[in-house]
Amino acid sequence: MIAQISLMKRRPEVSAEQFCKYWLDPHGVIATARPGLRRYTQSHVVDSPLTNALAEKLDITGFTEVWFDSEDGLKVPYPLTAQRQFEAESEQWRRHIGAVRRLVTEANEVIATPQGSAKAFIVNVGDRAGGEPWAEAHQQHVTRLPGICGYLRHKILRQGGPVGTRIAELKLPVAG
């Protein structure tokens, strides 16, 4: 499976509640019209004891996961009606979102995750030049933590800002 993950940062003048409300509807409703879409998930960030200084500085409002069977699914355009809806909403969306970092990943389910489980999204920030030797060690560590009931590991295929929009790129190199 291929997942396109978008790390979303809201504009500073927009409250988290306003952002999330708009993100759910109409944006989320329109986004689900994409042909070949296998799964669409919005993860809204909540306070967590795991939040660190970098996370607070980045102030990520949430993550979108858009899933397809293959990379070819990412290339299939929205139906014309959905395209028109997005165009009509594009100015509103730019008023809500401050920046985006998009990751195209190959998802590997290491431990099946039960429905209704709480999700912790761990982002390894940094340069990927050294490859992914840390991924195996990280997987071994995480899967041994008490209370872990699922583990999904994403191999990053490519990343960058949003394509074809005037929304700013979130300058955040993600190693894994």
Image (cartoon, grey):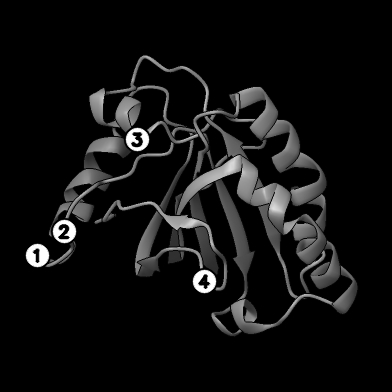
Mark identifier at residue 127: 2
- Which residue occupies the foreground of this view, 138 or 13? 13
In depth, the one of 104 and 100 nearer the eye is: 100
| Residue at the image position 35 percent from the left and 35 percent from the top | 58
Circle 3 residue:
58
The N terminus: image quadrant: bottom right
Q: CA distance from mark 4 to mark 2?
A: 21 Å
Please, what is the three-letter code of the amino acid marked with disc 2? Asp
Q: Position of residue 91 (x, y in %)?
A: 70, 54
Which comes sooner in the sequence, label 4 or label 3?
3
- Which residue position is annotated with label 4? 163
Tag 1 residue: 130
Q: Secondary structure at mark 3?
A: helix
Is the residue under label 2 in contact with that under label 1 (CB below 8 Å)? yes
Relative to 172, say whether 59 is above or below.
Answer: above
Residue at 36 percent of width and 14 percent of height: 49
Disc 1 is placed on an element classified as loop
Mark 4 and mark 3: Cα distance apart in space:
21 Å
Which numbered disc, 4 or 2, marks the residue that appears first in the sequence? 2
* First reached walking from the N terminus: tag 3 or tag 1: 3
Which image quadrant for residue 17?
top right
Q: Where is 25 relative to 55, above or below? A: below
Along the polypeptide, which appears first: circle 3 or circle 2?
Answer: 3
Task: Give the amino acid type for the residue marked by disc 4 in the picture.
Answer: Val
Point out the tag, 1 or 4, that comes first from the N-terminus: 1
Give the image quarter of residue 88: bottom right
Q: Badge 2, how many Cα within 10 Å: few under 14, some, many 20+?
A: few
The three-letter amino acid code for the residue at tag 1 is: Gly
Q: Is residue 50 left or right of residue 118?
A: left
